[in-house]
Amino acid sequence: MRFRLLIPLLFVSTLAFSQFTPGLNKTLGIEVFDGFILQHKPQISHLITKHPIGFRVTMDKKVYGSEPWQQRYNYPDMGMTFVYMDYRNPVLGKTLGLIPHINFYLRGNREAKGQLQFKMGFGMGYTTNKYNPETNNKNNVISTDLTGAVLFQFGYQYQLTDKLFFNSSASVTHFSNGAIKKPNSGINIIATNLGLSYMIRYEPKTFNFIEEKPLENKVIGASITLTGGAHESLKIGSGAKPFFVLSGLMDKQLNHKSRLGLGMEWFYSASLKDEIKYDDSVDKGTDSNRIGLYVSHELMINEFSIMGQVGYYIYDPYKPYQSVYLRLGLRRYFTKKLYSSIGVKSHSAKAEAMEFAIGYRLK
């Protein structure tokens, strides 16, 4: 099971080290937080006892417009968040997280001392007390040592001196293994955070601004993606088995930041195929394959992009999940045409799989 999670761990490590190339004006911060577990399912109510507490250490590098994408997004910070989470519950234990993030500034005046911010990140977590059928069977949220992690945060930062900043924020942190192993309800922590950050290797700099022309030729593109991974069926203990998804997408470049597209994909899951064999409520010859149509939006940030997709199964004889599915992921372009990505596919609040993909843009 740990081997299957090495792929996202390597993906996160690559993102982590890419943030810390030598340079000036990087900030190191520490925050403490107090929060609560969001009860997104009735089945996890027994785990909500005390308020989780912990701290976060952040490192960011500043950008000043040396590349066009930096100006488009109002000169965001790129960095890493380390999270220490104590659930104050022996069933859940503690979680350590390492989350590469991007921190957007929402105020147009980047020179102002007070700034509103929105941070988002995708990374990995390590949980000390996972589900065990004999010793920890009340933990129905996490059943693997390693998990995926997602961070969303709204905050306010005030510059006290040239180097020192005060930070306050409200955040949502999510940990889940993407159904690689069941049970996997996942856990969401809503928290308030307070802290300070300090700029190291400080050198005064100004934000560069160059007038950028809008796109004249908004081309229509096409891509093909092969996605794979492993997940466990709805039956706990059945074991993780491979799945594959073959997707085709037509999209249109809306502007420098966004692509909007429509696609079709075919799903094969060995876990669902086995589940049909033991499901007395359906015919044993029921097809486990699924076909979906989906709408896709890609937010492009340098060589990375954030993928958001909403799909609907037009062919789904077994119907193990809802007809509508969601996908959220992070994509990395190695060339203008070749890319890889990592993401989570879910049905409402129920994750179906953590996905790893490689793709190619045909035009």
Image: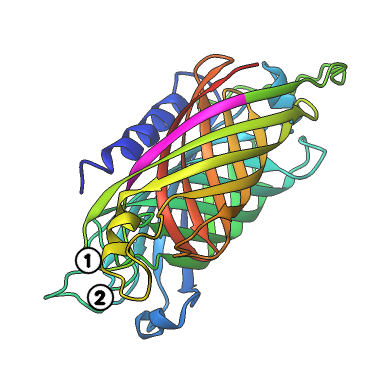
Percent x, y for residue 363? 65, 16
**Does the magenta portion include 240?**
no
Q: Say which label, 2 or 1, has the lower sequence index.
A: 2
| Residue at the spot of label 1 | 129
Q: Give the spatial CA distance, label 2 vs label 1.
A: 6 Å
Taking depth in this image into account, of 312 and 150 the one nearest to the observer is: 312
- From the viewer's perspective, is residue 248 above or below residue 327? above
Confirm whether residue 189 shows in the render: yes
**Does the magenta portion include 228?**
yes
Percent x, y for residue 306? 59, 38
Q: Which residues are magenta?
A: 223-230
Percent x, y for residue 146? 28, 51
Q: How is the image coloured?
A: rainbow
| Residue at the spot of label 2 | 91
- From the viewer's perspective, is residue 156 above or below residue 224? below
Q: Which mark is residue 301?
A: none
Residue at 52 percent of width and 37 percent of height: 330
Q: Are marks 2 and 1 in contact (CB under 8 Å)?
A: yes
Amino acid type at circle 1 is Asn
Amino acid type at circle 2 is Val
